[in-house]
Image: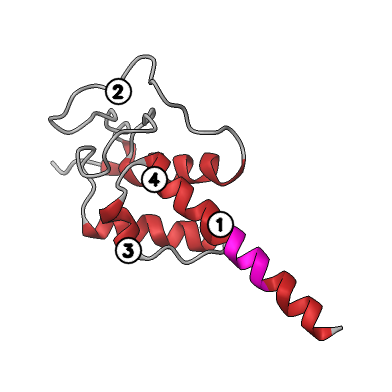
């Protein structure tokens, strides 16, 4: 009489009580690079197929544990530590992607300075 949960189909990905994703977003997330990886991570963690660049993380059902999971995946895949306050200050896909780009650039600049000092 028990349900075999392993055999059940994946539940449909639906947005929490918010509006549907815009059909044609005004702004777009740059394809490729960090922005594409950040978008993929958001889609995995939030279990949504299409996330617009200006949609708010919290409107999509995000919360503190979601932010921690996203930050951990960004650290693992992109090698940068995103401070958690970034998600609260700029809770959009574009805002977080921009912060990741800045962190990567800062890390690259620091590495270049370190290497030039070794010579």
Whichever of callouts 2 and 4 sits on the residue coming sooner in the sequence is: 2
Q: What residue is pinned by disc 1?
A: 77
Q: How many marks?
A: 4
Q: Distance between the Cα atoms at labels 2 and 4?
A: 17 Å
Badge 1 or badge 4: first in the primary sequence: 1
Q: What's the magenta bit mostly, secondary-structure-wise?
A: helix
Dot label at residue 21: 2
Depth check, front residue: 74 or 13: 74
Task: Tell me which segment is drawn in magenta.
Answer: 105-110
Task: Work out whether 41 lies above or below 21.
Answer: below
Query: The residue tagged with tag 2: helix, strand or loop?
Result: loop
Name which residue lies at 17% across and 33% down: 16
* CA–CA distance in space, label 3 to label 1: 17 Å
Disc 4: CA contacts within 10 A as few (<14), some (14-19) or many (>=20): some
Measure the C-alpha gap from mark 2 to mark 1: 26 Å
x, y percent for residue 72: 42, 63
């Amino acid at each position: 009489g028990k349900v075999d949960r392993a055999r059940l189909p994946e539940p449909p990905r639906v947005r929490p009580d918010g509006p549907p994703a815009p059909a044609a977003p005004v702004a777009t997330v740059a394809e490729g690079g960090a922005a594409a990886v950040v978008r993929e991570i958001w889609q995995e963690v939030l279990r949504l197929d299409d996330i617009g660049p200006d949609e708010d993380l919290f409107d999509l059902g995000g919360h503190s544990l979601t932010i921690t999971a996203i930050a951990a995946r960004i650290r693992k895949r992109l090698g940068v530590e995103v401070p958690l306050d970034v998600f609260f200050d700029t809770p959009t896909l574009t805002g977080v992607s921009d912060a990741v780009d800045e962190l990567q650039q800062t890390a690259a600049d620091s590495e270049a300075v370190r290497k030039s000092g070794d010579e």
